[in-house]
Structures are given as structure tokens and as C-alpha cells.
Amino acid sequence: MTIISKRSFSLGQITSWTHQEWLEQSESSEKNRLMIGVSGYESRSSDWMRKTLPVLTPSKNNTYLILGFNDYQQDLNRPRNDEFYSEKGLSVLVSKDKGKEDLDVVKESIIACVAMSGETPVEVHVDYSSMPRSWYCNLPFVLSEAVRPRDKLFFWYTPGSYPETEYPTAGVKDFSVFSGRPSLNPGIRTHCLGLGFDRIRSHAIWSVLDPTNLVCFFASPGTRSDYVDRVKRDNEDILSGANHVFAVDMRDFAHAYSRIAGVVREFHRLGDVILVPDGPKPLILASSLVPVVFGQPGIVCFHVSRRQNQQSEPVNVEPSGPAYGFSFSVPE
């Protein structure tokens, strides 16, 4: 089992990218690359790879690691995604079939890539569009332990079009501390709640927290033209009770992270800040990293798991635009 350290983590030289910008400069750069993706039931889970593989074909310099989920292997687009990778000569690895954990497999692959590269810089690319939260929020720490200052880490996200459906709600037992630690004697506790398209879930989280000092944030612009209006309409009562509301552009991860970190710094002067991110994955990832980068008591990030039930069915998410992402490096 992977032991994940969240100490001494830094987002060195963080830079936002579009997929097209990176592809255009990648062909002229001499690097070894490890591309990590998943084959899942969402059609968007292979979208980044479908656009990357024609430019950077598998070779000794371009290695691909495709992980497959242990469940839903015959549902929705999973068979089609598996077939696509097979046609490209890539195997879909279901880690549990090998008796291993997924993050252990990723770490082993990175260590091997770095070891064979010698003095050549390494780029590690993670397409986290269809990854579960327990993977993509922990991967920055796992990767940082395995690479060198000369190497670079990239995280990519393909926005999706989410269908209207009922989603599992949340309860008290579904909250867990992902990063950070509380102070011993906080003056005021400020809850910083990320809002998404799932109105039922947002209200469940709000009712469980029952915050006295509330900050809300959401993505703007959204993946669809009506996204922001829908978030505001569905969460009107939550937003009306907030002490502060702000929006961030998830297409620019570096700026989104800085904006969330700036608000946290401002309210941390008053007491503890508890981040409870929901909504798009880039905002969840940015929020999850803030307490670790700050490294100070009194800044905490909660993760809220989705409560599953027997009627829960997988939902297909189609890609709704080109991928964007960010890169960073580990400090000297």
C-alpha cells in the first residue's frame, strides 16, 4: 500500500497550459515522457489520449501507462475505450488483478522512467479527467517523491458535459480530512465551500456543516453557457447566506489556485479555514493542495465522499471542449 507523505510539498514554477500549446512545442523538445491515463466508462476518459497519441506515438521516449477500473468493466464506454487502447498496442492494466494498488503501480512506473533517463529530463503527464478523487488529489504528492528538480509534472483535465440526473447525497460520516490540520484554539472557523452542478449534494454538505462564517466559490466561466446561472439559481439560499462569494476560471489552474489560496490567507487571519471543495475536479484539486503548500495549522481540506446505493448507476460524461492543465516542478 502506498504511504503518501504530504509534508514539504511545493508547487514550483506552476504554469497553466492548453493541450494544443503543449502539443505544438512537445515535438521539438528532447525529453522522456510518461503519459498516465485511465480507461473508464466515460467517453471523455480516452479523449486526451486520442489527441496525444497521433503526435507522440509510443516509443522508448514516450511511455504510456493506462489504468483500468476494477468495476463497471462492461458498462457504457468502457469496452470501446479498452478497444481503442488495444488498437494502439497499449494494454489496460487493472492493478488489483496484479495484486497491487493503483498508486503503487504509478509510482513504480515513474521511478523506472526516471532511472532509465539518466541526465535527460522527464515529463510525467496525468490525465485526471475521469480519475476518482482519491487518485488525482494524491498523485501530486506521489509524483513529487519520485522525480527530480529537472523533471516536470503535468496534470490535464478535459471538461465534460454532465447529464441531468440524481446523484448520491452526503452525510456526517462521509466527511474526512484530506490535508492540513486544525489549530488548538481557533478564533473563528470559516468554511470555504465549493459549489458545483449537483444542487442536492451542495445543500447536504451545507446542512451538515451549518457554518457560522461561510465563503462560497464556483467556476466561471463554466463548461456550458448556462453553467454559472444554474449554479447561482440552484444554490441561491446558500449564496445569500455567505459572507463572501468569488468565482475562479478553472481553465487557468495557476490563477485559480492563487485565487483560492489568497482568500484562504485572508480569512486565516481570523481563525481556522476549512475548505470543502465540490464541483469541477480542477477546483477540488487546487483546494486540496492549499493546506499542504501553506503548511500552517488552522488550514484544513475536507473531502466528502459520495454515498453509494444499490440504485446508483454509472453516468457517461462526454467531452465538452479541449483539455487544459498545469505543470510544476519540485524544488532543488
Image (cartoon, helix red, strand yellow):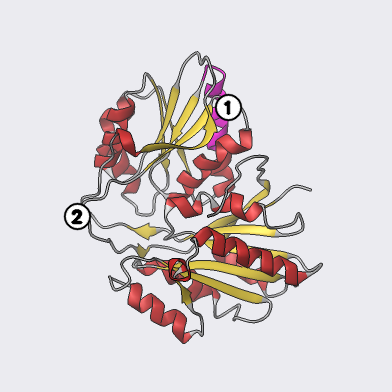
139 drawn magenta: no
Question: Residue lying furthest right in this view?
Answer: 119
Give the left or right position of residue 79, taking residue 1 as reference.
left
Q: Which residue is mark 1?
A: 265
Question: Residue lying furthest front in this view?
Answer: 99
Query: What residue lies at 27% left-to-right and 35% top-to-bottom?
Result: 204
Task: Reply above or below: 164 against 210.
Answer: below
Give the left or right position of residue 200, taking residue 318 as reference.
left
Range covered by the magenta-colored residues: 259-271
Residue 105 location, quadrant: bottom right
Closest to the observer, 125 or 104: 104
Q: Residues within 10 Å of mark 1 (few under 14, many from 20)?
A: some
Q: Position of residue 300 (x, y in %)?
A: 50, 31
Front disc: 1 or 2: 2
Closest to the observer, 225 or 13: 13
Q: Amino acid at mark 2?
A: Gln
Task: Reply above or below: 229 against 163.
Answer: above
Q: Amino acid at mark 1?
A: Arg
Q: Position of residue 291 (x, y in %)?
A: 56, 35
Badge 1 or badge 2: first in the primary sequence = 1
Q: Which residue is mark 2?
A: 310
Count of labels in the image: 2
Query: What residue lies at 51% left-to-right and 22% top-to-bottom?
Result: 272
Closest to the observer, 171 or 51: 171
Q: Position of residue 327 (x, y in %)?
A: 63, 55
Main SS, magenta region, reads helix
Give the left or right position of residue 63, taking residue 120 as reference.
left
Q: Position of residue 315 (x, y in %)?
A: 27, 61
Residue 219 location, quadrant: top left
